[in-house]
Image: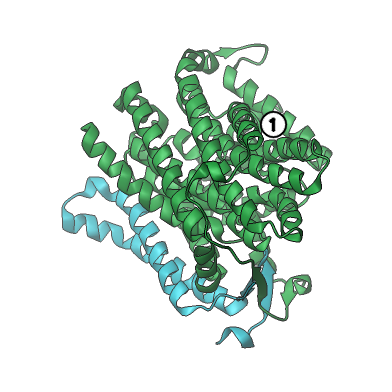
Chain colours: A green, B cyan
Amino acid sequence: MEIASLLVQVTLLTTFSVLLYIIIGMIPGTDETATIAPITLAFLAAGFDPLLILAWFMGTIVAFKAADAVPTALAAIPGGVMAVPQVPDALVARKHGYSEILLRKGITASVIGTIVAIAITLPLSFSLAPLGDLLKNPAGPLNWPGWVYLIVAGTLLLAVMSKAKILALLAIFPFAMLVQGLRGLYGHSAFISIFLAITVGPILYELLTLISPNNHHLKRKEYARIKLVKTGKISLNPLHHLTKVEVALSSVLAGLSGILATFMSPVGLTVLFGDLVKESQKDELKGSLMAYAVRDAIKNATYIGGTLIPLIALGVPTGPMSAGPAHPFFAELAVFGGSTPRDVLLQRYSTPTIMLVTVYATIFAAVLAYLILIKYSRQLTRFVFKKVPAEALYATFLAIVMVLAYNDAGLAGVFGSILVGLISATFVRNGVSIGILFMVLVAAPYLVGLLF
Amino acid sequence: MGGASQDLYEIFGEVIAEYDFLKAFLITVILAFLMYFSAPQIVKMLGREDLLNALRVTLSALGAFLGFIISTAIIEPKRIVEEG
């Protein structure tokens, strides 16, 4: 494909993904994995060009991560799971009448996080590429490929950092057995239906509670009340929105988190570094504003680094991001003759082309999302809250999951997805990070092999 | 059935009505599967049976998206926005 025609297609796709995911990102209750992974997987399973879908994916990440903080700043309601740690910062800002300043800081910091992450992790990915072959060869006492040791080590690390450490450790083998058991029943190594069931598990669990007699705790008498704070005229110049210290902290921590996200959880890094920054300040308001900005930069950087380093350098999923939202790129798909979209991407395109398209799509998405959000954040939030019903969104993602599960393993795939979704949700609701379940899914054949 | 006369529930910080959700779910699932199962006829008409698997997934995602648009048009969001 000619570069010019490729860039035109990338521009159109990225524009569409940014517009779509700004809206999805603002809607409360939309989990990143549940909304990004099924659509990416649907595109790849349909045989669309992996480089174009990578551009689409970068657009979704950048837009979602920037947009989910907008309702957090304006209404103290997180637009997604990754924005939850920002709610306390937003409440402090609101108490002092700084919601609009917070909003501007967040959107600007997310652009900084995106640019720093792409500048550091993309060249790093290509320079680490030789490591990929090493990670694919069987080695060590268990004769596992190197990447399996990494993912099992990452799973254990994430488990001991979870809120429910013991439950997280206990979940590893039973969940691996569930995955392998279902694969035995299906008669093939199904991935898509099980993966999607984990992504929508928490939503599925809550929705199924609606048909249970024990749903009184969820009943409400009236509609949700959302208070939107006023905003004034906002400058487009990003230099007006952050202090020098905030720019420096956002850049350094975004760069570091982008690399660490190869193995570590994006939510964990957002909480860890954000809290460290907050604790370092004596003044409550200053600490909250700084932490909010830094968390926004880290959110974007972890999603970008956690995708690009495993995708380009290692070739195997090594952390919660690459085993989670970005996993569709590592899935062996029939439409690519059993190869992964990642392998097709590297065979079909040269290194400079991949770099050019990835940098272009990411920076274009960041600038577009910045301009839209900084200028129209209040109008967009009002539009989304007043026009888009949560019922339609939940139903759409469940329908996509059901049809892909059916395509993967027939009617058994649909029922298997309900089983996996409910078990995943039980673990997640009790404090086990969803990243652990993704990583167990990827390492399941090796983990179950240890038991026999 | 209007939103006000239905039982309301809070799911992930959002208030939803059970019948409205059921309505949205049926619309999107039926459209997604309708498109999925009509894919063989469509590829036959196009004379491109080799595209069946790819088109199946694309068409069903399109069906779900159509379902989203229709559901959004007919269901009222359960939020009251108070502007400060």
Where residue B1 sits in the image (x, y, percent)?
55, 87
- Pick the front one: A416 or A203: A203
A46 over A150 or under it: above or below: below
Question: x, y percentage for residue A37?
Answer: 50, 47
Query: A75 or A440, which lies in front?
Result: A75
Q: Position of residue B38 (x, y in %)?
A: 30, 62
Quadrant where the C terminus of chain A lies? top right
Residue at 62% across, 27% down:
A256
Location of residue A360 with respect to B24 vertically, above or below: above
Q: Would residue A198 be found to the left or right of residue A427 on screen?
A: left
Count of number-bearing discs: 1
Above or below A15: residue A449:
above
Residue depicted at x 65% and y 37%? A246
For the question of whether residue B52 can be seen, the reply is: yes
| Viewer-proximal residue among A288 and A58 | A288
Report whether A141 appears left or right of A309.
right
Q: Residue at x 31, y 48 (%)?
A: A12
Query: In the image, is residue A216 above or below residue A430?
Result: below
Chain under callout 1: A
Q: Position of residue A394 (x, y in %)?
A: 55, 63
Q: Is residue A451 left or right of residue A231?
A: right
Visible in this render: residue A173? no
Quarter assignment of residue A30: bottom right
A442 vs A70, nearest the viewer: A70
Residue type, numbered disc 1? Thr
- Helix, strand or loop at label 1? It is helix
The answer to which image quadrant residue B31 occupies is: bottom left
Which quadrant does the N terminus of chain A fall into?
A: top left
* Residue under the image location 74 percent in, 36 percent down: A277
Question: How crowded is the residue under tag 1: few (<14 C-alpha within 10 Å), some, or many (20+)?
Answer: many
Residue at mark 1: A155
